Image (spheres, coloured by chain):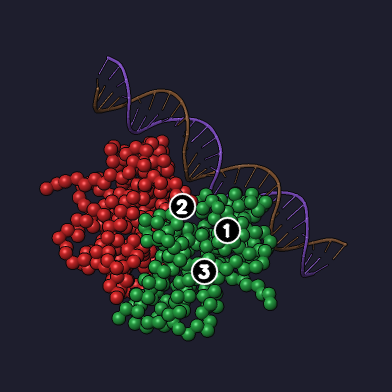
Chain colours: A red, B green, C brown, D purple
DNA sequence: TTATGTTAGATAGTATTACTATCATTCAAA
DNA sequence: TTTGAATGATAGTAATACTATCTAACATAA
């Protein structure tokens, strides 16, 4: 069986749908490689254009600026994570096991699926960890939020919050806990790798350590009397 | 009684000590106002130079680039917070009350001290919330970390971790919990203001809500059997 | 007093970034 | 066969992120 997964990112994020054309798909795929390699600050449309043997003008026809391109990539990621979550939670009855599965998903790499136009999941994961907060930590956050471009992130957060409430209906901060788990999963992985004094990693890798810490934090928060 | 508080920021952060000259102090003070007003991305040395009626060259003699200037401001802030923490914890015996005091400090504005060369604490607070992660979420993090420029942040994190261990010596993740509390205090305040769906704020203000959420999270994590 | 050094101002200049605009070409659908 | 949509090629602008040099002011040391 071979099927194609496609996540429709809101058209507010792009000028022309990159999924619809060959160049568009190359833009996204190479953008992921380049942002990973250079970091978002050093990433430019000029460098991307050289990489894909196209012109800057072509890329500007798809995205207003590099901030929107990053937003596109992250929205794709958040939608994908939500899909994997719903898929992975099928047939699990125990709400505790559900939440454990969610933490594993948040702290470990996405599976590298087949198909040669596939994005590099390891790079994508690192981009999410190091660059994701840059899409909302901007002066224009209120205006761009009106365009509903953060919906996939809010949806994911809402899903996890619903699982928390399912496990403990009396817990008062399901959404804040949910967004804290997502953000902390990024920070703790980043700190474990580059600023380990801000964490308690020792023998474990960044991902296993983060999963352990977050599970402890989550279940103590919601299973406490 | 009138005394002068001064926090020595590591000389690795600047080229010339801004505390030592009139222009230097104006650079810091106006940088805080401008970064607050424009956001870090739109803040430039040119705009700052115009603001303080100096030239770009003058500012470049104090700081290598705007990233270093932001780092200076944050290091000053982290040192100040650590001082206020140690000061505010004097004569408190109860470790629980100590930790509650810390959360209040992390989630509420700094006191506006007297002295006319004083930084705007409200702006400073907003800068910490919205811009602080940008100093370490960069590709160069490993190199700049070697210069010990994140020491004030690590020290603050270590202090809070020590209080956590004091309250519960068996808790396994004092430093990760500490950095999570600091980061979450920023994120939850930011989300409460601009992306409230990611939180559970309702009637409270962003700061009071964040304090309530964090206290609940902290004490359940460390007082659980 | 003169010499020296430090600091800032004034001015200039460069490479790169972040776009915008125009026109020609290709190619696929109507 | 025509039309239109997408891309390429080319050009250009304003702003950014610096670097360099020379001069003036001023404080200090010989």
Rounded to the nearest angstrom, the CA distance separating label 3 from label 1 is 15 Å
Rounded to the nearest angstrom, the CA distance separating label 2 from label 1 is 16 Å
Q: Residue furthest front?
A: B203
Q: Is residue A100 visible?
A: no
Relative image position of residue A129 (x, y in whole percent):
36, 59
Q: Which residue is mark 2?
A: A138
Q: Residue furthest left?
A: A1
Q: Residues within 10 Å of mark 2 (few under 14, many from 20)?
A: some
For residue D19, side relative to residue A95 (left or right): right
Rounded to the nearest angstrom, the CA distance separating label 2 from label 3 is 22 Å
Label 3 marks a residue whose chain is B
- Quarter of the picture containing the N terminus of chain B is bottom right
Circles 2 and 3 on the same chain: no
Q: Secondary structure at mark 2?
A: loop
User: Is A81 in front, or is B140?
Assistant: A81
Circles 2 and 1 on the same chain: no
Whether tag 2 and tag 1 are in contact, CB under 8 A, the answer is no
- Quarter of the picture containing the C terminus of chain B is bottom left
Q: Which residue is mark 3?
A: B78
Label 1 marks a residue whose chain is B
Relative image position of residue B10 (x, y in whole percent):
56, 69
For residue B13, side relative to residue B200 (left or right): right
Looking at the image, tell me whether mark 3 or mark 1 is earlier in sequence order: 1
User: Is B52 in front, or is C4?
Assistant: B52
* Label at residue B149: none
Disc count in the image? 3
Q: Which residue is mark 1?
A: B32
User: Is B127 in front, or is B189?
Assistant: B189
For residue B166, side relative to residue A22 (left or right): right
Relative image position of residue B182 (x, y in whole percent):
44, 68
């Amino acid at each position: 069986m071979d099927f194609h997964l496609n996540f429709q990112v809101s058209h507010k994020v792009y000028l022309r749908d990159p999924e619809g054309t060959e160049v568009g798909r190359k833009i996204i795929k190479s953008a992921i490689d380049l942002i990973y390699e250079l970091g978002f600050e050093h990433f430019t449309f000029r460098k991307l254009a050289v990489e894909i043997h196209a012109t800057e003008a072509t890329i500007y026809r798809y995205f207003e600026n590099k901030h929107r391109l990053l937003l596109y990539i992250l929205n794709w990621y958040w939608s994908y994570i939500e899909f994997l979550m719903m898929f992975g939670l099928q047939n699990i009855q125990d709400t505790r096991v559900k939440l454990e599965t969610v933490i594993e998903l948040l702290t470990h790499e996405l599976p590298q699926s087949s198909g040669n136009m596939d994005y590099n999941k390891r790079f994508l994961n690192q981009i999410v960890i190091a660059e994701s907060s840059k899409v909302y930590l901007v002066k224009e956050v209120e205006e761009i939020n009106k365009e509903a471009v953060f919906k996939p992130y809010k949806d994911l957060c809402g899903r996890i919050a619903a699982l928390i409430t399912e496990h403990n209906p009396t817990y008062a901060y399901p959404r804040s806990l949910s967004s804290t788990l997502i953000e902390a999963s990024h920070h703790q992985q980043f700190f474990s790798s580059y600023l380990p004094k801000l964490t308690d990693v020792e023998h474990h890798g960044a991902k296993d350590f983060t999963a352990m810490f977050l599970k402890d934090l989550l279940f103590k928060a919601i299973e406490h009397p």
